[in-house]
Amino acid sequence: MFYSDLTLKTSIRTIPVKTASAHYPVYVGRGLFAEIPRRTRLTRSGRRVFVLTSPEIWALWGEQFAAAFPDAPAVLFLPVGERFKRLAQVERLAGELVAAGADRSSLLIAFGGGIVGDLGGFLAAIYMRGIEYIQVPTTLLAQVDSSVGGKTGVNLTAGKNLIGSFHHPSAVFADIDTLQTLPERELRAGLFESIKAGIIRDAMLFRFMEHNSETILARDAAALERVITASIRMKAGVVGIDERESGLRMILNFGHTFGHAIEAATGYRRLLHGEAIAWGMLAALQIALARETAGPDQAERIERTILAYGPLPLFRATADKLLEAAGHDKKNRAGRRRFVLPKGIGDAVVVEDVTDEEMENAARWVLEKARE
Amino acid sequence: MFYSDLTLKTSIRTIPVKTASAHYPVYVGRGLFAEIPRRTRLTRSGRRVFVLTSPEIWALWGEQFAAAFPDAPAVLFLPVGERFKRLAQVERLAGELVAAGADRSSLLIAFGGGIVGDLGGFLAAIYMRGIEYIQVPTTLLAQVDSSVGGKTGVNLTAGKNLIGSFHHPSAVFADIDTLQTLPERELRAGLFESIKAGIIRDAMLFRFMEHNSETILARDAAALERVITASIRMKAGVVGIDERESGLRMILNFGHTFGHAIEAATGYRRLLHGEAIAWGMLAALQIALARETAGPDQAERIERTILAYGPLPLFRATADKLLEAAGHDKKNRAGRRRFVLPKGIGDAVVVEDVTDEEMENAARWVLEKARE
């Protein structure tokens, strides 16, 4: 039937995010730029639109992006790199917004990867005590993870994302087309977060990724759409239940205790975030195995699937440095160490009684495995 | 009666603030430091307390303050001055919090004037995406205005408070004793905000201040308590109805359009905030007079009362500079200029149709009046 065919071809999936403080749609599909003006309230009279992006993304997609808007939006740039995810850049960009006439009714669009999204969301959260923003994530990691859930922020010298706000976008547009220009390594790094989604909450997603790594890595649009939609649904579901990470949301940190520690111990330079999380999941898996929250077969399947989306870059660090960095992880509460362990495949549990010895064993295991 | 006498002597007034997102008490009285541990949840096990203060306030009151706590709180310092109300200081202090082991369950106490309160509240708002804080304001301005209502923030080069968050304290302790060490000029500057409260919403408060300037300026504790309590009640009432300044809360900006412009045009150095607001109210009054939202008698009473709490420092600026700064004021919405005018005494109105000519006339009037 002609009508269904057309619907199928141009289908846009809409995933609602419903939390205590916000309610907004995440759109997943192709050719989404053109949808932005229609699906957001850009027609309000006198309303100004500002785009925060990276020079690289704008060079690839800027022309097409700008063409979607009736009036060309003002463009602000953030250089690429974790070292620019700092308050100094927020201050510079806020100054540029003032100079360009942005007021409380202006809209900011964060168009780029996770750093643009996190910093852009934070800029929107604190500019004139908060303006509206939307996310247009262009990396897989940003699409499946950082653009959904309202966490925004920047880094301190002492650690990542130690400064930030909860500030939800009013919409997210995850355009699969933009993934075609994503470097191979970043695609793989993002897929680790989707594997995480499968391990902690969606056994079907895990199985799909377990059995279709080649199709997914070949960027088949239908396969990517399935992975992205399932990952976002998982995150939206968790965030809807626990917006402020007082309970369930903590399971999203699976792999993050050691992942953050590995990033810190390697100076945030050697590994992409998703790669560090992959190593962190493997480290956490050792504790899960010893505690039997996951059986040997399940652990083997998880490890094999993670490695199928590799290679994981090797690195060197000392166990002391890794453990010290893990101790500073902000997920701790009043000195207690919270740790996420997989419970088989498709479920996870947060425990508070991981011992120093278990931490040391996991650290040593991962350092041995990652040795160059 | 003995019991009543005792109650009267040690009485602490409690003003509830109830907004859509928060509900907390403001305590007004004497000897309040000792009440802090009991009236906040400091007994939670493992909970850390951090105090942000200025070296000056700590030198005067630190010993007494620290003695109120079962365990000495860690102390962080912010130098005095509007030029330190910046993101660079927020970043430094956040780094010190990390180094001192502050986590998401820690409590920050902002103990000082308006800058300590605004920056401290903002630090609490964005440290690890938000920790609990309480306000212990030590200046009159901070007690009657900035510590209540949840507005926090820092300055940009382009203007004051252009970066910030809405983040309510979990309690405010306005200790009248601390006003005994407040410099005379700061006391007067704070009283202008109370006059503002009277003009826009509390005719009884205005009359009390109109007829008791000598007693109030002599720091009579009962008179100060009455002024402070009425001012806070007024603000709590307005903020309870309109937390995010989408309507009624805008009346609190009476005097602020020109007040902010005068501060900006004089480089934030020559005038205290309250003094600039006093000039700003006088300027706005000229527009109210011409539009007859206030009659000549009312305008005369307002002007006389403001000047009774003077002297107001003189200053020089050009009309162009003042008008340009007034145009950048963040209270504008999508290019429209919102302006607060007194409606007689005890009421105010927000208008959007103030003309360039009216602005120019008011600017010229105030510049003439303030000429050194």
Image (spheres, coloured by chain):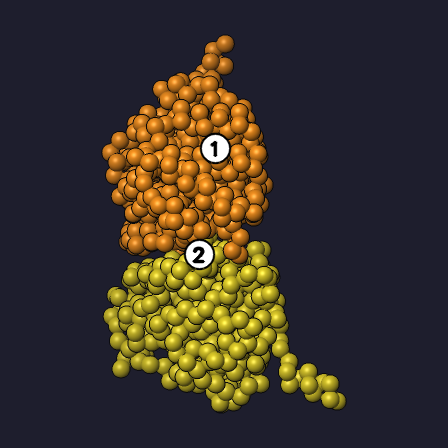
Chain colours: A orange, B yellow
Mark identifier at residue A196:
1
Q: Position of residue B167 (x, y in %)?
A: 49, 58
Would you say B3 lies left or right of A333 here?
Answer: right
> Disc 1: which chain?
A
- Left or right of residue A73, residue A255 in this image: right
Image quarter (top left, top right, bottom left or bottom right) of the N terminus of chain B: bottom right
Q: Secondary structure at mark 1?
A: helix
Instruction: Kindly identify which chain the residue marked by label 2 belongs to.
Output: B
The amino acid on which the numbered mark 2 sits, given as a three-letter code, is Tyr
> Which residue is at the front of the view, A289 or A28?
A289
Badge 2 marks a residue whose secondary structure is loop
Q: Quote the CA–CA distance across marks 1 and 2.
A: 27 Å
**At label 1, which amino acid type do we have?**
Lys
Q: Which mark is residue B163?
A: none
Q: Nearer the viewer, residue A337 or A103?
A: A337
Q: In this rendered view, identify the residue nearer to me: B88 or B114.
A: B88
- Label 2 belongs to which residue? B127
Other-residue count near label 1 (Cα within 10 Å), few / some / many at <14 / 14–19 / ≥20: many
Give me the residue at 47% from left, 72% from top: B111
A246 sits left or right of A102 in the view:
right
Q: Determine whether A322 is above or below B185 in the image.
A: above
